[in-house]
Amino acid sequence: MSTANTTPLFPFDNQFARDMQGMFAPWEPAKVPAPRWLRFNHALAESMGLEADRLGSDEGLQVLAGNVVPEGATPLAQAYAGHQFGGFSPQLGDGRALLLGEVVTPEGKRLDIAFKGSGRTPFSRGGDGKAAVGPVLREYLISEAMYALGIPTTRTLAAVATGETIARDRPLPGAILTRVASSHVRVGTFQFFAARGDIDSLRKLVNFVVNRHYPALADAEGPERALGLLRAVQTRQAKLIAQWMGVAFIHGVMNTDNMTLSGETIDYGPCAFMEAYDPQTVFSSIDHGGRYAYGNQPGIAQWNLTRLAETLLPLIDAEDSDKAVALATEVIEAFPAEFDGHWLNVHRRKLGIPATQEDGPPGQDTEAEQDRNLVNDYLQLLHRHGVDFTLGFRRLSRVLRGQSSEWSSQFAAQAEPDLQAWSQRWLSRLPSDGTVARSEHADAMDAVNPLYIPRNHLVENALDAASDPGDMALFERLLAIVTRPFDEREADALAALAGTPEQTQGFRTFCGT
């Protein structure tokens, strides 16, 4: 008598496949010769209501390697277009990814489960559709670090080595990543159908995104639904980019096909965390002009949202294009002020400053403007003296604990007068309720200013070891550190330090395509 578990491995309920016909190509993952676990995210599986032990077994390995299509799956490659470094490609699509299906968590949240690196699709455009161990583990590491930092992000359920060798600039071991996302609809998805004049598909997309991500708009009809969606997406993106800026995260490739309608960070290709503060910092090897530099990210987000707005114009007003443009422009022009509000609140929390009811746009003589100047002046100090962004904020709380030298020692000696002047302004902005209150402020600052981020040299060391000779120990150690980013631990002291000049000089990241 068989004791095999016959219940489905995933309780799939595949809304996109069911409702969005014409927006994808049904496809199956390529078989791989010798799959083995790199890492399985047991905690994520449990939080999704999945049978984690079973999914992390040999049965699950064959499924997450693409060798077995699980019951209820409807694997498909999604269609989308996109502006890549400003140039429009009318057809991109999932060239090495497949949406396996969707599950609904015990809390009622619908999530996509998708492969990355599972082989060629109809959208591969000459590529092999594969992924290497290094880029797969980079996405695992950085996405889980972002989740631990409280930033909306796709997550990684599993990384599986395939037993293949794939050709890049040199032969590399192959791997497949299993990504979990609120959905994979992007600005580029809308651009794909707008470029073809397919208004019906655009309307279906609007309804899909509203029902899945913005239920508050469910009762909106006609033009107000499309315009309301644009406003809602803009709000989420303004907040997301402000959160990126608050932890010195550089996405590296903010093409329109890498901006989700859900407001999650997606596609961890040439991403990295800035160390010495400089708004012009670029790590991506393909970003020759600095389009996606750290300081350019808010402006690029607005540019991408403008491209989204263009796709929605026929739904905002089909009869009067000038009116549609005017209405969409009003929304897009509100982005800088909306972003600034989120950015200011992110940095207020980093400085332990309470919010005010007087918030207004930059330039007005308000408490908000004083706080804005205080933050910007501190960033200028960090920039002028080449101070690490993460430690520059984290060690500021030491001042409130009577350990000012641990903060000021990060700066050059000649910075002392400027530090004194700035710190007096900062301290005067904090509520003065005695020693206990100061300690509480310090604790609140430490709860939002991470001590541990994925330092670039540590990431590269871990990925190199995992790729050749296949040693996962450094990766596991670093993952454990960056997924507990706020609590100081003596054993992890070295992981908190910025890289040396030898480690940081000329550092570059790559797409891994």
Image (cartoon, rainbow, N blue to C red):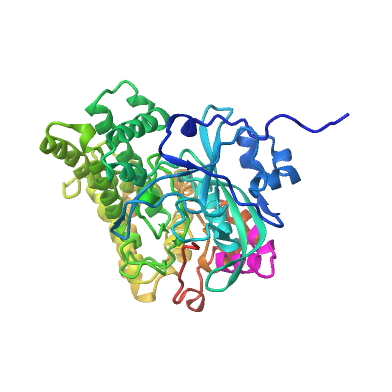
Viewer-proximal residue among 6 and 225 = 6
Q: State the residue at coordinates (48%, 38%).
A: 182
Q: Is residue 33 depicted above or below 221 in this figure?
A: below
The residue segment tinted magenta is 459-476
The rendered magenta stretch, by its main secondary structure, is classed as helix
Residue 445 x, y percent position in the rendering: 45, 49
Residue 368 seen from this side = no
Residue 129 x, y percent position in the rendering: 52, 57
Q: How many marks?
A: 0
Q: State the residue at coordinates (69%, 35%).
A: 51
Q: Is residue 389 depicted above or below 149 in this figure?
A: below
Q: State the residue at coordinates (51%, 58%).
A: 453
Viewer-proximal residue among 163 and 180 = 163
Q: State the residue at coordinates (65%, 61%).
A: 491
User: Would you say 298 lies left or right of 5 here?
Assistant: left
Viewer-proximal residue among 393 and 319 = 319
Residue 229 x, y percent position in the rendering: 30, 33
User: Would you say 456 lies left or right of 203 here?
Assistant: right
Residue 448 seen from this side = yes
Give the image quarter of residue 412: bottom left
Which residue in the rendered view is the most extreme toward the top?
219
* Residue 72 on the magenta span: no
Q: Is residue 100 depicted above or below 87 in this figure?
A: above
Residue 348 x, y percent position in the rendering: 35, 48
Which residue in the rendered view is the most extreme toward the right?
1
Which residue in the rendered view is the most extreme toward the bottom?
502
The N terminus - image quarter = top right
* Residue 470 on the magenta span: yes
